[in-house]
């Protein structure tokens, strides 16, 4: 991490222009690049309070965001995007194969209890991204497994890797998300291998703490560990939710 992080950025300063906003469960991050400001993941739908508050503490509003980049369709990561768009006009980007689900037109790939109990307000996608496409300083890397359209965002210039739930770090230890929350465990391990080839200075996960101590080697170690294990048979916990999406909570 930079020795003197930028304290004008929303959230807990991690490096120049980079802030960490802790939500009730999932992480959001804000990155300033030149005159542009990017949000990576938008948290739960309830007015996106942690994000709005963090921006307000440094004299900003969501109107100052160039894009909200969503790593995947689960409500703890994309739920707040509907409110940010409704109240502030914040534009949304995600992987093209996750677009239908995020817009409320496709099936929710989440555990049954999440589909039944947790609202996920749909939001229009302004920029569907294909694998390898860039948006500002970010390259979108399709890393299916946790969901079919999961995407990691890589800042090649600064070697920042935003993994969403492709890799998480409870207590600062890298691991894969739980089997019960993962759409396809085999593909999640294959996607993990792709990330091991990146040069990573700072890994910023969807859950847990950012990892700055040898994140690349820790990714490679995790891949070796997980690829050596037999993949347990996975129960089918996913599919169309069978009920309409609810409107954003405003």
Image (cartoon, rainbow, N blue to C red):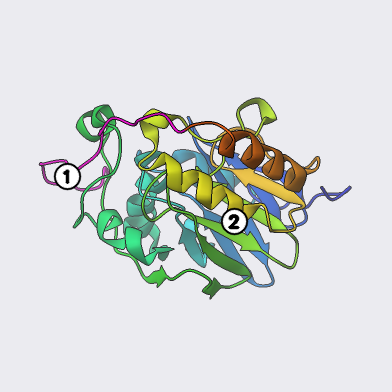
Nearest to viewer (mark 2 / mark 1): 2
- Mark 2: give few (<14), some (14-19) or many (20+) Cα within 10 Å: some
Question: Looking at the figure, which quarter contains the C terminus?
Answer: top left
The numbered mark, 2 or 1, whose residue comes first in the sequence reads 2
Q: Residue 103's spot in the image, x, y percent?
A: 26, 58
The Cα atoms of the two marked residues, 2 and 1, are separated by 29 Å
Residue 129 among magenta residues: no
Q: Residue at x 38, y 64 (%)?
A: 89
Q: Which mark is residue 194?
A: 2
Q: Residue 100's spot in the image, x, y percent?
A: 25, 60
Q: Which mark is residue 210?
A: none
Q: Classify 129 as above or below 192.
A: below
Q: What element carries label 1?
A: loop
Residue 123 visible? The answer is yes
**Left or right, residue 132 beside residue 108:** right
Q: Residue 23's spot in the image, x, y percent?
A: 51, 35
Q: Residue 240 carries which label?
A: 1
Q: Report the magenta stretch's main SS.
A: loop
Q: In the rendered structure, which segment of residues is drawn in magenta?
A: 231-250
Q: Which residue is drawn at 54% across and 41% down?
A: 206
- Mark 1: give few (<14), some (14-19) or many (20+) Cα within 10 Å: few
**Left or right, residue 145 beside residue 209:** left
Residue 243 among magenta residues: yes
Q: Is mark 2 on a helix, strand or loop?
A: helix
Image quarter of residue 160:
bottom right
**Left or right, residue 79 beside residue 62:** left
């Amino acid at each position: 991490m930079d020795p003197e992080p930028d304290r004008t950025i929303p959230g807990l300063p991690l490096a120049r222009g980079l802030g960490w906003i802790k939500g009730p469960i999932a992480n959001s991050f804000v990155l300033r690049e030149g005159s542009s400001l990017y949000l990576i993941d938008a948290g739960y739908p309830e007015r996106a309070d942690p994000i709005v508050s963090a921006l307000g503490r440094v004299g900003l509003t969501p109107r100052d965001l160039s894009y909200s980049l969503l790593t995947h369709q689960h409500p703890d990561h994309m739920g707040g995007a509907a409110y940010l768009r409704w109240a502030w006009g914040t534009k949304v980007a995600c992987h093209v194969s996750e677009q239908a689900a995020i817009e409320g037109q496709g099936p929710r790939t989440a555990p049954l209890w999440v589909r039944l109990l947790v609202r996920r307000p749909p939001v229009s996608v302004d920029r569907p991204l294909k694998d390898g496409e860039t948006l500002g300083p970010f390259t979108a890397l399709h890393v299916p497994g946790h969901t079919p359209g999961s995407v990691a965002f890589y800042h090649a210039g600064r070697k920042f890797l935003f993994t969403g739930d492709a890799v998480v770090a409870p207590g600062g230890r890298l691991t894969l998300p739980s089997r019960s929350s993962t759409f396809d465990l085999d593909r999640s391990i294959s996607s993990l291998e792709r990330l091991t080839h990146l040069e990573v200075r700072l890994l910023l996960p969807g859950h847990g703490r950012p990892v700055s101590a040898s994140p690349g080697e820790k990714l490679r170690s995790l891949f070796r560990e997980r690829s050596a294990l037999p993949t347990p048979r996975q129960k089918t916990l996913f599919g169309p939710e069978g009920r309409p999406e609810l409107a954003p909570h405003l």
